[in-house]
């Protein structure tokens, strides 16, 4: 029996060695590899870099794992990744195989890992990128990455490797990251805010956070692309399925029109509030009453707690304060949907005495149209001057989670609403 076990172990080790050798040879066939990690914006950064490299005439394979995991081929067509079980970083081995077969000049891959040890394996062994982009450090996946910015930053440093260039927004750089980089022989490149990169991003077909476009432009310039090529590439970016999208919709049996903006994929509170501010700034919806539809997931209790704690700390007098920038957003009301909505409202009412009207929960397992009708009937959408004939259309932002009810709402709006450009 012992001999059988020893032989089995020996054959297994030989197999692992053979697989590692093949994987290493495939990596060597890909001249340039770029990986993107961080909390928010990974898919957008990956798509901007990919589109501009392709515009420059390079053969590029890319992978995004945002709202819909896809592989993007050199001709620009996308193939959705079909998963039989839970996502695994071993998908990156298949990505390397595809990229090597395509004889690409560049591979641009969104990293999948959350666990620090998986981040290490994905970067050091599976992808081995020469450039690593860290989009930002935000509170999310708290049970795994840590509860403070310092803990989350240290978790991402597990992806650092010797000789690697790490790009990240200057404002996201923490001393702990510099110390880790020095010990691992990694070069950190803090990217400063740049008005020129903002001008290049004007051509994007959707609103994008400035740090994301700033990072992408910085990496593309390092790859020796001209600003003219980058501008043309920006215009050809295919947005991720979870990017901000908006519709104009009239729920049946109602006479009111609603503007609905999907920010479900932003996930964490800070990113969501900043995205709402950016959309309002871009559209000029300053005078419209703004409401939130917060969708909870049964399997993301940590995110539910993160949202209710954030609201309890930052929502006062219908105004939410962005604790990072100090900016303020007026939120006239909030509808809660999905598992945990009743408990969330109860918690908020306990913390914020004024929420008896401003927050309500949708019925159990609600249909999207029913929720929109409830929002219209629950909140009074009239101007401050009730005698005025002007009644601005309400703007409802979808927040929290895109999986589950969030996707159901998007599917409904795709069928019944009129898409509008943000």
Image: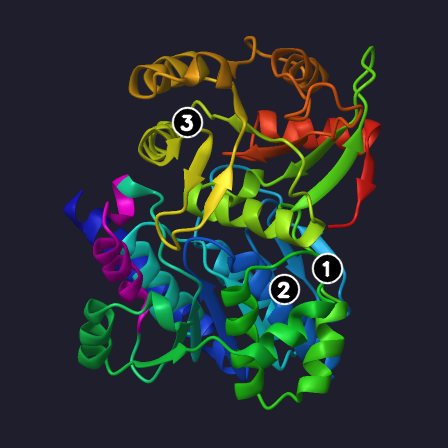
Q: Which residues are magenta?
A: 143-160
Q: CA distance from mark 2 to mark 3?
A: 28 Å
Name the residue at 52% across, 45% down.
266
Secondary structure state at the residue bearing disc 3: loop
Q: Say which quarter of the image contains residue 53.
A: bottom right
Q: Residues within 10 Å of mark 3 (few under 14, many from 20)?
A: few
Name the residue at 43% across, 80% down. 130
In the rendering, at what x and y percent does residue 243 appear? 63, 49
Q: Residue at x 61, y 35 (%)?
A: 397
- Determine contact: label 1, label 2, CB under 8 Å: yes
Residue 73 against residue 31 in the figure, above or below: above
Along the line of sight, the residue nearer the viewer: 350 or 11: 350
Which residue has dot 3 on it?
299
Principal SS element in the magenta part? helix
Q: Name the front one of labels 1 and 3.
A: 1
Q: Is residue 340 visible?
A: no
Task: Kindly identify which numbered label has been placed on residue 47.
Answer: 2
- Label 1, secondary structure: give it: loop
Q: Indicate left or right for 136 with 157 as reference.
A: right
Residue corresponding to mark 1: 238
Task: Determine crowd level at label 2: few under 14, some 14-19, many 20+ residues with C-alpha closer than 10 A.
Answer: many
Within 10 angstroms of label 1, few (less than 14), some, or many (20 or more) residues?
A: some
Query: Which quarter of the picture shows residue 96?
Result: bottom right
In the picture, residue 220 is in which quadrant?
bottom right
Label 2, secondary structure: give it. helix
Label located before the other in sequence (2 or 3): 2
- Give the percent coordinates (x, y) of residue 1: 18, 42
- The answer to the question of whether label 1 and label 3 lie on touching residues, with beta carbons closer than 8 A, is no
Q: Position of residue 91 (x, y in %)?
A: 50, 54
The CA span between labels 1 and 3 is: 30 Å
- Viewer-nearest residue: 330 or 370: 330
């Amino acid at each position: 029996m012992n001999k059988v076990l020893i032989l089995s172990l020996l054959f297994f080790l030989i197999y692992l060695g053979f697989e590692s050798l093949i994987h290493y040879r495939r990596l060597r066939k890909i001249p340039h590899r770029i990986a993107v990690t961080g909390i928010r914006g990974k898919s957008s950064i990956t798509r901007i870099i990919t589109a501009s490299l392709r515009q420059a005439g390079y053969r590029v394979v890319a992978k995004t794992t945002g709202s819909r995991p896809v592989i993007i081929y050199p001709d620009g067509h996308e193939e959705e990744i079909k998963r039989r079980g839970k996502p695994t970083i071993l998908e990156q081995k298949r990505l390397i195989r595809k990229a090597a077969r395509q004889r690409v000049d560049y591979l641009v891959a969104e990293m999948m890992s959350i666990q620090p040890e998986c981040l290490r394996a994905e970067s050091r062994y599976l992808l081995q990128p020469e450039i690593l982009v860290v989009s930002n450090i935000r509170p999310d996946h708290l049970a795994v990455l840590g509860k403070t910015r310092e803990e989350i930053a240290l978790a991402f440093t597990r992806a650092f490797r010797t000789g690697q260039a790490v790009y990240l927004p200057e404002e996201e750089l923490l001393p702990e990251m510099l110390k880790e980089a020095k010990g691992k022989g990694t070069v950190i490149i803090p990217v400063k805010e740049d008005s020129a990169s903002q001008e290049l991003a004007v051509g994007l077909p959707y609103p994008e956070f400035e740090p994301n476009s700033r990072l992408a432009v910085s990496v593309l310039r390092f790859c020796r692309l001209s600003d003219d090529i980058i501008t043309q590439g920006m215009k050809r970016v295919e947005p991720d399925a979870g990017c901000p999208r908006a519709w104009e919709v009239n729920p049946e049996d109602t006479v009111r029109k609603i503007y609905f903006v999907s920010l479900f994929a932003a996930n964490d509170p800070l990113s969501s509030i900043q995205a709402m501010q950016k959309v309002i700034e871009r559209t000029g919806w300053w005078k419209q009453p703004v409401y939130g539809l917060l969708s909870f997931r049964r399997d993301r209790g940590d995110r539910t707690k993160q949202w209710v704690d954030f609201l309890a700390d930052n929502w006062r007098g219908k105004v939410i304060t962005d604790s990072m920038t100090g900016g303020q957003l007026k939120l006239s009301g909030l509808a809660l949907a999905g598992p945990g909505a009743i408990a969330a409202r109860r918690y908020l009412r306990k913390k914020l005495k004024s929420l008896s009207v401003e927050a309500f929960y949708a019925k159990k397992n609600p249909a999207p149209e029913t929720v929109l009708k409830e929002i219209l009937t629950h909140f009074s959408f009239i101007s401050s001057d009730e005698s005025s004939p002007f009644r601005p259309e309400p703007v409802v932002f979808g927040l929290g989670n895109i999986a589950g009810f969030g996707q159901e709402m998007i599917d409904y709006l795709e069928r019944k609403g009129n898409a509008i450009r943000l």
